[in-house]
Image (cartoon, rainbow, N blue to C red):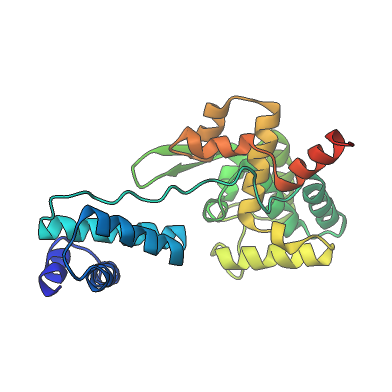
Amino acid sequence: MEDFKHHLLDRGFSSHTVESYLYAAKQLEDRVSVGFSNESLLAHKDWLASRYAVKTVNLRITAINSYLDFVGYDGIRLKSLHVQQKPYLDNVISQNDYELLRDSLKRDGDLFWHFVVRFLAGTGARVSELRQFTVESVFMGYLDLVSKGQKLRRIYIPASLQRDSAEWLKLLGKTTGYVFTSKGNAPMTARGLSLGLKRCAARYGINQDVVYPHSFRHRFAKNFIERNPDIAFLADLMGHESLETTRIYLRRTASEQRAAVDATIDW
């Protein structure tokens, strides 16, 4: 195991990853004490699957395969467990609840959180991206971001949202800097935004489980695909690398499935 540890360190693995790989390899050695065989490896995989979550099993399998490569075992390499996607979207805010939250915040003059909600649902931005909107980007109508792979992604601000938020910023006398700030000029933290949304949900009696930043990104995608079926365009708007990631928005939410069943089946 010491040699395997040095091998992993030489490959640049983090100490946490090395520790995880060593644990998986030692667990394998302890359970398959009479030497590896294809049958014993498959039996060990079955044992893992019976005791751990799929994600944990797949991490162990990756580590085991690395160990098998290191010791030069000439048999099989274990395949990861298939992670089956749910046939529905879970915990997505409904259009009715979104509108209730949006309109209630505006009615009560809580425009900061009103626009947080509208920007999340109207642009499909992740919370990390929401934090980067500036006054300048509002007046331009879009925010350009560069990913780690130097790929440009443009997040558009719809015309009505651009107009309304520009008027709000003018009333605040805000002419530059980040839009959603806490104290000072720094953007509000992701945690601060998440907790603030939960408080807003509680204020208006909306289920807090469906009110979190990414829920509004799901709402954006669901609404878009219902009005424009161009899934490739939606994938570009959301910054997805694969269309498979975007296809989930073709599915109904659990509550939508339930409503469809209730409306259809009366026998």
Residue displayed at 85% across by 41% down:
262
Q: Quadrant of residue 112?
A: bottom right
- Is residue 44 found left or right of 125 in the rendered image? left
Most extreme residue toward the right is 266
Residue displayed at 73% across by 51% down:
93
Name the residue nearer the viewer: 244 or 21.
Answer: 21
Residue 204 visible in image: yes
Residue displayed at 61% across by 71% down:
183
- Is residue 12 found left or right of 23 in the rendered image? left
Residue displayed at 22% across by 64% down:
13
Q: Position of residue 114 (x, y in %)?
A: 75, 54
Residue 52 visible in image: no
Count of number-bearing discs: 0
- Is residue 19 found left or right of 185 in the rendered image? left
Name the residue nearer the viewer: 44 or 18.
Answer: 44
Q: Quadrant of the C terminus?
A: top right
Q: Quadrant of the N terminus?
A: bottom left
Q: Is residue 198 above or below residue 165?
A: below
Q: Position of residue 121 (x, y in %)?
A: 68, 45
Q: Position of residue 187 (x, y in %)?
A: 55, 62
Q: Quadrant of residue 68?
A: bottom left
Q: Quadrant of residue 45?
A: bottom left
Name the residue nearer the viewer: 110 or 86.
Answer: 86
Q: Position of residue 24 (x, y in %)?
A: 28, 68
Name the residue nearer the viewer: 85 or 165.
Answer: 85
